[in-house]
Amino acid sequence: MKRTAVNLLSLCLLACLLRPALADAPDADKKADISDLDKKGAAKMATEVCASCHGPFGRSTMPTFPRLAGQTPDYLATQLKAFRDQTRGDPDAVAYMWGMASQLDDNSIGALADFFSKQRPVTGSQSNSAAIAAGKQIYEKGIPAQQIPACETCHGKGAVGMGPFPRLAGQHAPYLFKQMLVIQNVLRTAPVMHGVVKDLTREQMQSVAGYLESL
């Protein structure tokens, strides 16, 4: 009940922040990519609503909630639309983001994605542990014996992300590990990623997650 009440209050605040800006925008702006009013509303929402879970400017300190700062705008927009449309069905999406995203229109989503993509990302602390080295090997080279491709192919050198493929560098390791598990168990629909992680062991996934957090 407590979480439901908090979510309802957040939804009310979200609606109050977004709708005045969108209602005042001229029709031409509503059809444009992102209007100035959308950008102002997104910045206000990001700092007054999203920050409660994802941290100031998207630099989350809680592993339950992913870091959004520096994330690719295409990926952010795709995920927000999936939350809004309830097509991303992993447990955390249902618990936290289905309700939060339900009031967002495409312009608001574009503005939020643009805002977070321009924030300074978190950088990890380098580590030379054996687990990190193993994760680096999988990320950069894959596992040819298991026909597992290199993660770098889609997520780029240094895991900075490319277009629809998300930035993974500096992300919380527990969050990344959890997402690999839910994709592996088809709790989250991601056909490309499922093909990559379906044969990874928990130890291998934890090594990759630890390496990515260290970047």
Image (tube, rainbow, N blue to C red):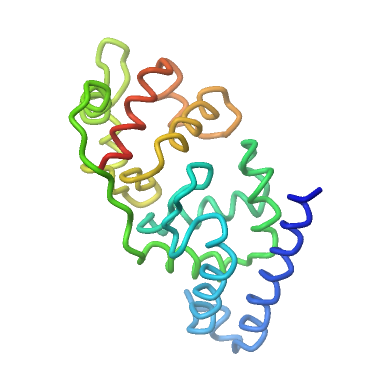
- Name the residue: 28% across, 50% down: 123
- Name the residue: 56% across, 22% down: 185
Image quadrant holding the C terminus, namely: top left
Percent coordinates x, y for residue 105 in the rendering: 63, 67
Q: Is residue 144 left or right of residue 191?
A: left
Percent coordinates x, y for residue 21 in the rendering: 61, 83
Front residue of this view, candidates 105 and 125:
125
The image quarter containing residue 195 is top left
Front residue of this view, candidates 202 and 166:
202
Front residue of this view, candidates 170 and 155:
170
Q: Residue furthest right?
A: 1
Q: Is residue 18 left or right of residue 164?
A: right
Q: Is residue 15 above or below residue 82?
A: below
Q: Residue furthest top?
A: 145
- Name the residue: 51% across, 70% down: 47
Percent coordinates x, y for residue 31 in the rendering: 55, 78
Q: Residue furthest left?
A: 128
Q: Is residue 57 left or right of residue 157?
A: right
- Name the residue: 47% across, 38% down: 175
